[in-house]
Every structure is written in structure tokens, then in C-alpha cells.
Image: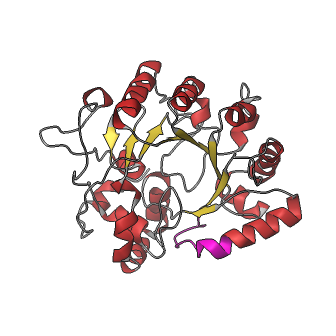
Amino acid sequence: MHATLPLLARTEFPAIRRRRLETLQVNLGYVCNQTCVHCHVNAGPKRTESMSRETVDQVLAYLRASGAAAIDLTGGAPELNPHFRHLVREARALGVNVIDRCNLTVLFEPGQEDTAEFLASQQVSIVASLPCYTEELVDRQRGKGVHDASIRAIRILNGLGYGRDGSGLTLDLVYNPQGAKLPPPQAALEADYKRILGANFGIAFNRLYTIANMPIQRFGSMLVSKGEFNSYMKLLRESHRTENLEDVMCRSTVSVDWRGFLYDCDFNQMLGLALQVAGRPRMHLSHALDSDLDGNPIVVRDHCFGCTAGQGSSCGGALA
């Protein structure tokens, strides 16, 4: 795999600082039942990195101390971590909103037969990947048979109340572009998704998030191999909108890796760019309980233009 960090080292991205912490985003490991072309984590079935119970309990201690309103669980497939349910139950007991970044097909993996029911019982918000509404494009990006399995999974979730008005169970979908281009306007694409998925499959969801592909890890390496890395970076830089800087997710989110180290965002985590606090080369959860990160400078590189280009992009979709 081609390393992309050396290609991002020199940057003109504006300096920005943190605000009050609102969301703790936790990567529970890189184990996944899928191997997606656009994956910025380089996750897959052969990865072995997985957060331990000790680190999960440190996450909970930090969650209590920080006062964050939400915990955003990601991976890999976060549900494949053996301590996933313990973390969910304890976070919900604290009154924290729990978000599960679900790839949908994980619901059919051995041992996951009751995962959908567990998520509903804990009122977990689900953000599910479905990079297109057509079988051809989903399977091209995520693997053969993924589209059909994803539709079956959404039907199961709909049957439990997810995506249905008045249920209190939120199901949001995620779109990623095919290749080196920016996402289309989010609102218009959401309307297309709802119309087509409703008519063809009778399924429902709450919102669609459009997220730009980051030029790092598996997707970045693919761009290098195809000779498209520089042109994609040129597109991101030229599409930068200063107003998007106000709402980039790193201002109010802290990312935690499977070992418990802190980063400004999940993308920096994948590049090994640790959150910088004066006097520490990198910070671990076990040393962060008394740290106030409000006003702390955010580590930036050229990949950050992926969050400010066009309508903007974050784990919560478009910014503009």
C-alpha cells in the first residue's frame, strides 16, 4: 500500500482550534467483515486490532469526566468487538446518546443474530453505510452481494421501528462518491434515496449523510496507483470554502483509537497524527481525565481540505 502522509506533509490549511467537547468518537478496532475500496481505515477480516476491556472501561471513565453528550462507535465493524455491548449499556446508563456506525451486513455474521434487537432495546442511533441505491455501484465499492444483504438488514431494522416516524429509533444512511470526486448536494440526493429505496424495496430511513472520500489509507493508495492523487488534492484545495471551517467536526469531537490514544479526528488517527497537548507527544485516555482541550490547536494537513471542500463533509454529513 502506498503511504500518503508524506504527500500531505506540507499544507496551507488554515490553523484552527478546538471548542467544548460534544462527541467522543471511539474506534473499537479494525476488524471488519467487509473490505471496501473507499475505506480510510484499511479495515477488513484479516485485521486483528481490537480494543480491550480495560481500554473500554477507560473510555467510560473519560466519558463520565468529560461530560460529552454523545459517543460515536466506529471501526472496522464496531459490533465485532467483544466488549461492544458492555460499552453501549454503560454509556446509555449515563444518559449519553450512542451512535453505532454499522455496515449493515455485520448483522448476518455469526454471533450477531440478535444485534439489531439489542441496538433497538438500548435506543442506539444507527448510521449505516449504503454508498448508492443501485446494486451495481454498492457491490462495486463494497463487495458482491453487499447491496442485497444491506437491503435485508434495513428491512429488519425498519421492522423494529428504525427509520419510522414516532419510534424514537434513528436510522441514517451514508453515501460515499465513486472515485475521485466530491459528493453531490446532500438534500437532493437524500430525496432520490428515499424515493427510489421506498418504491423499489419498501424501506425507510431518517437522513442521508454525504461524506467525501479521504485521500488516505486504502482510498489514498488507490489514487496514487491510478495517478489521480494530485488531481484529487487539487480538486479539494480549489473547492475549499472558508465558512465550512466553523463547523468541521474536529472542533467538538475527540477521536480515540483501539489502544486508547487521542486524536483530533478519525482521519488523523489513521495517519498517526496524535492530538497535541503542550508537553506531551501524544495523550492517552488514562492521562486525559483532568485535561481541558477547549482552545487546543488542531493538527492539520492537506487531507483536511476534504472536510471543507464544496458543501463540506463530516461524520454527520454535509456542513453547508
Residue 145 in the image: above or below residue 289: below
Please state which of residues 226 and 238 is positioned toward the viewer in this rendering.
Answer: 238
Give me the residue at 28% from left, 54% from top: 18
Using the rendered image of the protein, determine whether residue 315 is visible from the camera's viewpoint.
yes
Q: Position of residue 53 (x, y in %)?
A: 47, 20
Which quadrant of the figure has residue 177? bottom right
Residue 180 painted magenta: yes
Q: Residue 233: in sight, yes or no? A: no
- Where is residue 30? Give x, y as percent: 51, 37
As drawn, 61 above or below 103: above
* Residue drawn 22% across the image and 54% down it: 297
Q: How is the image coloured?
A: secondary structure
274 relative position to 265: left or right:
left
Counting from the top left corner in percent of width and height, residue 67 is at 38, 38
Residue at left offset 42%, top offset 73%? 309
Q: Is residue 298 magenta?
A: no
Residue at x-position 44% and y-position 72%: 232
Write the start and end of the magenta stretch as one range. Answer: 176-189
